[in-house]
Amino acid sequence: MKDNNLLDIVIPAIREVTNNPQLDVDADNFLVSDIGLESIDLVDLCSVLEDITDIELDFEEVARFASAQDGAAVNMQQLRVRHMNDFLLSKTSS
């Protein structure tokens, strides 16, 4: 695991949830509009990431974290891959 980047965990988890190992994903992709995740997929993504990292994920908490990080309200539709990465990093450094 890299010290400042968990994208090597987050992106494969997204590929697993979408059942698309070749999916082109980058940190600025929106989870819903760019990648096409639906509500159940977001729950699955949380579950996969929790299993890998042993960090409890709650999308409302992630959205609050992202809002504070971006300085503007972020809802589930506006969550980006980087928000997941940064949220997990914040939990591993605390």
Image (cartoon, helix red, strand yellow):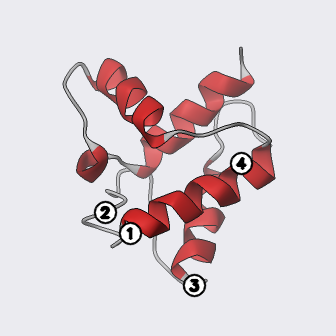
Question: Which residue is pictured at 49% across the width and 79% down the height?
Answer: 23
- For the residue marked with disc 1, what is the amino acid? Leu
Q: Is residue 27 above or below residue 45?
A: above
For mark 4, give the secondary structure.
helix
Could you give the CA–CA distance between mark 3 and mark 2, rounded to whole angstroms?
Answer: 15 Å
Q: The N terminus appears in which quarter of the rendering?
A: top right
- For the residue marked with disc 4, what is the amino acid? Glu
Relative depth, front residue between 16 and 59: 59
Q: Would residue 9 be found to the left or right of residue 58 on screen?
A: right
On the image, numbered disc 3 is attached to which residue?
Answer: 19
- For the residue marked with disc 3, what is the amino acid? Asn
N-terminal-most mark, 2 or 4: 2
Kindly indicate the quadrant of the structure image that contains residue 38: bottom left
Relative depth, front residue between 3 and 30: 30
Query: Which residue extends farthest top?
Result: 94
Could you give the CA–CA distance between mark 2 and mark 4, rounded to whole angstroms?
Answer: 19 Å
N-terminal-most mark, 3 or 4: 3
On the image, numbered disc 1 is attached to which residue?
Answer: 37
On the image, numbered disc 2 is attached to which residue?
Answer: 32
- Structural crowding at the residue carrying mark 3, measured as other residues with C-alpha within 10 Å and reported as few (<14), some (14–19) or many (≥20): few
Question: Which residue is pictured at 44% across the width and 59% down the height?
Answer: 26
Q: Is residue 51 above or below residue 65?
A: below
For mark 3, give the secondary structure.
loop
On the image, numbered disc 4 is attached to which residue?
Answer: 50
- For the residue marked with disc 2, what is the amino acid? Val
N-terminal-most mark, 1 or 4: 1
For mark 2, give the secondary structure.
loop
For mark 1, give the secondary structure.
loop
Relative depth, front residue between 73 and 4: 73
